[in-house]
Amino acid sequence: METAVLFLLLFGLLLIGAPIAIALGLSSVLYIALFSHDSMSSVTIQMFNASQNFTLLAIPFFILASSFMSTGGVARRIVNFAVATVGWVRGGLAMAGVLACMIFAALSGSSPATVVAIGTIAIAAMRQAGYSKEFAAGIIANAGTLGILIPPSIVMVVYAAATNVSVGRMFLAGVIPGIVAGLMLMVTIYIIARKKNLPAQPFPSIRVLWSTFAEAAFGMFLIVIILGGIYAGVFTPTEAAAVAAVYACLIALFIYRDMGPLKEKKWRKSGEGLLEAIVRNIGLSVLYFFPAFFHRDTRKVLVESSKTTIMLMFIIVNALLFAHTLTAERIPQVITDWMLGAGFNWFTFLIAVNIILLIGGQFMEPSGLLLIVAPVVFPIAVELGVDPIHLGIIMVVNMEIGMITPPIGLNLFVTSGITGMSLVQVVRAAAPFVMVLLVFLVLVTYLPWLSTALPTYMMGPEVIVR
């Protein structure tokens, strides 16, 4: 009965319009005050301990790196490279949008950031090539969800912090599923393109392919820095996030120069010799090095990323307090005993998890929902022999689908904002491709090797401490 009160408090607050962070924190505090044997001082202790989690320190740095990459012209160069790579196939411009989302996802770790950065450019390009606005919007809304599946992923960091699994393993586990999801969307696009006779771009020359790759290479090298640095043992995931933020800042300000005091200053002027250009650019970089960090463009990026970080961390801290309340009252253990007594096995358990997350994802922000559900289902999964990394990828894929299902799907609102379409139009446009992701969810759920093969090969078998 007391357990029911906790969840009634939570959903009651959500139904009256309370922000999710307030609903999580207030329901926990009221439950502790009225029913728990814990003292109220435990609230302060748990919130302080949650804010001291070293793993969560990666989140603000990944958000900052994503902000610089979104502002610094990286997306435009990635789209150009993607178009040169697959644009010559029928429906290739739409496929290029998916490929660009996959590449940018490996830089940003954020789904909405991927939709905004790539969608603003790719949707306009598809419209000019003769694609319908609905088709273009539906593709980008769905492909943008890969931002939280392809590593590095902020949602994966949250799951790792909530369950004490390895962030490195989670990042590796997302590689194969992310590629498979992208390929499934591309195959769907190709089938539709053949039926609707959608256009193809001219076949690019090797020179064009190389030049677009060279322009995007500095941005895409961030993937090598993050993942290569982690798995080469150079730095931890948190340190990788900090390095990524610094690198993204330097690339945006001094290499691509789409922001900051060097904006629109060309690397090489007409008639200028190579040596002269090198000397001039070194001088400009030295001259404007410190002013660039105080420029209004840089301040704007820092302020926007700070707002996002504060919002997300407030949700996470309150969600971890809610998770502590669940654990302290032994609610996961009670549910585990009940499910085992009811004859659940790993197969039926994963069906139940997917149903819960698909429904919850329609109404809640991904990180908050994950932090509520993970502490409950994690011990049950371990008891039933489900790999914790496999469970994490299942949860992330469910969060993906939740971001493109109404009424709260964030990617739907973002796509609506950048296209000028109504929310209902975006929902209709995205629906056919949501079905593809639902099929992908079934594959990820019941083919665990998709998630576990690469982490096991790179890092050895998972050691589970019960």
Image (cartoon, rainbow, N blue to C red):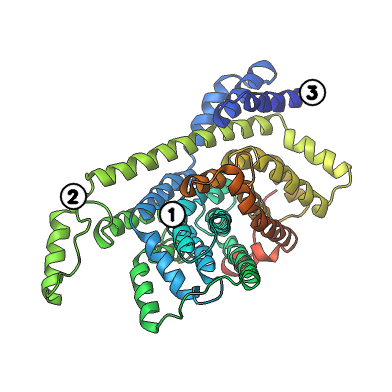
- Residue closest to the eye, 410 or 395: 410
Q: Residues within 10 Å of mark 1 (few under 14, many from 20)?
A: some
Circle 3 or circle 1, nearest the eye: 1
> Residue under circle 1?
120
Report x, y in % for residue 149.
57, 56
Asked whether, in this view, residue 103 is left or right of residue 395, the answer is left
Does residue 80 show up? Answer: yes
Mark 3 and mark 2: Cα distance apart in space: 60 Å
Quarter residue 331 falls in? top right
- Residue closest to the eye, 307 or 53: 307
* Callout 2: SS: helix
**Labelled disc at residue 1:** 3
Report x, y in % for residue 323.
63, 34
Mark 3 and mark 1: Cα distance apart in space: 50 Å
Q: Earlier in the sequence, mark 2 or mark 1?
A: 1
**Labelled disc at residue 290:** 2
Q: Earlier in the sequence, mark 3 or mark 2?
A: 3
Report x, y in % for residue 303.
34, 39
Furthest toward the top, the residue is 34
Q: Is residue 10 above or below residue 366?
A: above
* Callout 1: SS: helix
Callout 3–callout 1 Cβ contact below 8 Å: no
